[in-house]
Amino acid sequence: MMNRTFETDREKVLDGVLSVESILEYFLQRIASENGRINAFIDVDTGAREAARRVDVSLAEGTDLPLAGMIVGVKDVLAREGKPLSCASNMLAGFTSVFTATAVERLEAQGAVVIGRTNCDEFAMGSSNENSIHGPARNPHDTDRVCGGSSGGSAAAVAAGLCHVALGSDTGGSVRQPAAFCGTIGLKPTYGRISRSGLVAFASSLDCVGPIANTVGDVAAAMQFMAGHDPKDATSSVNEVPNYRGGLPDPGTLRVGIPNEYFADDLPTSILRAVEQSKGRLKEAGVEFDEVSLPNTPLGVSTYYILACAEASSNLARYDGVRYGSRSSVSQTDEANGIADFYARNRTAGFGEEVKRRLMLGTYVLSAGYYDKYYARAQAARRLIKNDFDKVFESVDVLLTPVTPTTAYPIGTRKDRVLETYQEDIFTVTANLAGIPAISVPIGTDDEGLPVGVQLLSHHFNERSLLALAGELLSESNKR
Ligand code: GLN
């Protein structure tokens, strides 16, 4: 089945051939028939039909709504006013948001309709969507396998044709890795390009909102309206938003580097083959290639996990059962032994195992006596990684690498292999540490028919070159 795209549906809406409501109905039916199998959506938005009707009325009145017809899934870490928000955690069970995330608000303002909340790992911590109180979302290509994470439900929903676009968040690969596992496109923009207001904080210096879709055009359409300065996020960039939807650089003018640190000897041939194929396609389009080096890449995973856990331990301190988060029944029925005990009981009951592991790790690396040894050193390593990128982008425009060291693995097989799973983030975390944009593009399948992706990275605010090359990789002539 070919998934519907916003690009083609939009034209039909503008021609008056399709109503937004009918497009929404189509996707609601898709969810009704397919979601039981893949668990990508955790709910369907009760207000979606009404929102779609409102867009149809506005269009009939002549209002220009460039995203009319776009049906969007929203990862359950983005706030929407009056709607539940759980971060796939017991801690926020029953919580309702009082405001809407800027990224979502901006899409809705242009006519997009939110169809529901997508599954994810608890507080976006994970790579397989198995750390979710809603149960794992499953890979549409093989439902015994993971769909990746943490934005697993978003990628699975798009891959299964349950919405045009889904929003994810990417702190260390959570948009790109599930996109690769599910055979969709995922863009992690430059840090600060899209406002984080309303995105539940995991690691604030790394968190980015990013779109997942089946075509470069749909990714670009969502980016176009989400990007831009927002007074509600002090780290959002004031740089002008360029045109992502047209006038992209000619691939023939771009130089692409292949960083040798991203190609360990034990990478599966399917992944090496995808990179080789991509290189071949881009060469045909006139792209020139260079071998380059990013020598500090091996520091990426440990640096990321120290910094991400440290920031998480601070960000998630607010969930104590008083300011935010649920109170455990134990702390209500049984006299708690002081306030610290009261917090501890609520946090013990509310958080899942992986979140607790990270909060303890984060608290440890920030504690007096260890701060210099871990946190300060990780900050220094982050600088080295960023310097590596700055240096290579003096000679090349874009880098081509794998996204993941494996394709989608069977659900339940990584449970006791925590560190190994962390290691598998090696190709994605560096972009977050450096704040640069990166895109995951689906390139064929492995011998078992599972999707394989490649990653393109560029310097700050150069999403346009990523979209141009992704478009080239996915152009009709290349779909053989
Ligand atoms: N897999 C990484 C982690 O578990 C990335 C998570 C993310 O980007 N939100 O931290």
Image (cartoon, grey):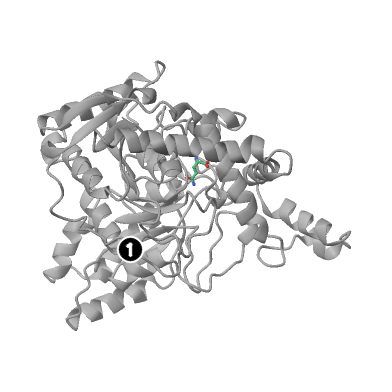
Quarter of the image with the N terminus in it: top left
Disc 1 marks which amino acid?
Gly
Q: Number of marks in the image?
A: 1
Q: Nearer the viewer, residue 379 or 242?
A: 379
Residue 311 spot, x, y in % from top left: 59, 49
Q: Nearer the viewer, residue 269 or 19?
A: 269
User: Would you call the spot at circle 1 few (<14 residues within 10 Å), some (14-19), or many (20 or more)?
Assistant: many
Q: Is residue 206 left or right of residue 105?
A: right
Residue 119 spot, x, y in % from top left: 48, 52
Q: Residue furthest bottom?
A: 61
Task: Return the residue at label 1.
Answer: 228
Quarter of the image with the C terminus in it: top left
Q: Is residue 56 left or right of residue 102?
A: left
Circle 1 SS class: loop
Q: Nearer the viewer, residue 252 or 31?
A: 252
Residue at 78% over, 61% down: 329
Q: Quadrant of residue 177?
A: top left
Residue at 34% over, 22% down: 260
Q: Quadrant of residue 253?
A: top left
Q: Is residue 182 above or below residue 279?
A: below
The reply to whether residue 1 is in sight is no
The reply to whether residue 331 is in sight is yes
